[in-house]
Amino acid sequence: MSNLSYYEMRLEMCKVAKMMWDRRLTNAAGGNFAVRVDENRILISPSLMSERKHCEMQPEDFLLIDYDRNIIEGEGKLSRESLMHVLILQNFKEIECTIHAHPFYCMPFVAQSKPIPNVTEATMGRGEVGCIEWTKAYSEELSRNVYQYFEDHRETAVKKPIGMIMPKHGVVVSGPSIYLAYSMLERIECDAFCTITKNLI
């Protein structure tokens, strides 16, 4: 057994990272995710997880940080979007995992700043995947605008996984566990695909 802390969760995070890449739920342009494993302790993917590693992660690749984004365990570099994850995980005890990704069929909605509607039972009751205003990528303002979206949708976010769009950039989803956050990512990708192809049937 490894001496790494939260080793079992690290293994699960490796699986999720691989599924994100293999199922085209993110691309080489980016993607990152984080899991709150304890009070004031978050495991988070390092910078360039997609571009350099193509989401082929090892347990030791994930960084253990606190709410001030101090690296407690690990040698990688923090993603520039880490603040976004920390703000949500610190202030929503009901949310354990957040995922930022660039899913293939979601990206047309992202590029055009259009919400993804609920068109399948899998997302009913979770609200549409709405957009915030465009904000410069990797900025603190973007992280805080993403967090504000979750605050504005707190009533739903504390009960169910939700998703949102950062225009021209990507999506963010949440969940009370890593499994449910990943599930939400697949669910909104399905809704996006169904919406795009509805006139082909």
Image (cartoon, rainbow, N blue to C red):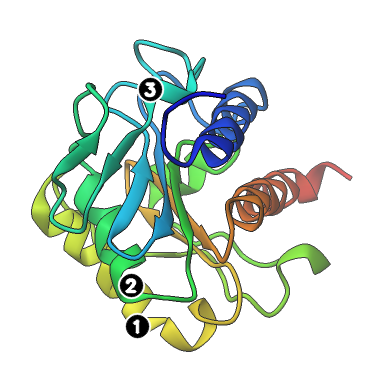
Q: Nearer the viewer, residue 155 or 14?
A: 14
Residue 162 in the image: x percent, y percent? 54, 67
Find the distance from the CA under tag 2 to the CA under tag 1: 5 Å
Residue 130 visible in the shown view: yes
Q: Residue at x 53, y 83 (%)?
A: 156
Q: Position of residue 192 (x, y in %)?
A: 64, 49
Name the element at disc 2.
Answer: helix
Badge 2 is on which residue?
149
Say if 35 sits above or below 2 in the image.
below
- The residues bearing labels 2 and 3 have C-alpha atoms spaced at a distance of 29 Å
Amino acid type assigned to the residue bearing label 1 in the image: Asp
Image spot of residue 123 (x, y percent):
71, 67
- Seen in the picture, residue 26 relative to 110 is either above or below; the reply is above
- In-image side of 133 versus 19 (left or right): left
Residue 65 as seen in the image, left or right of residue 173: left
Residue 152 marker: 1
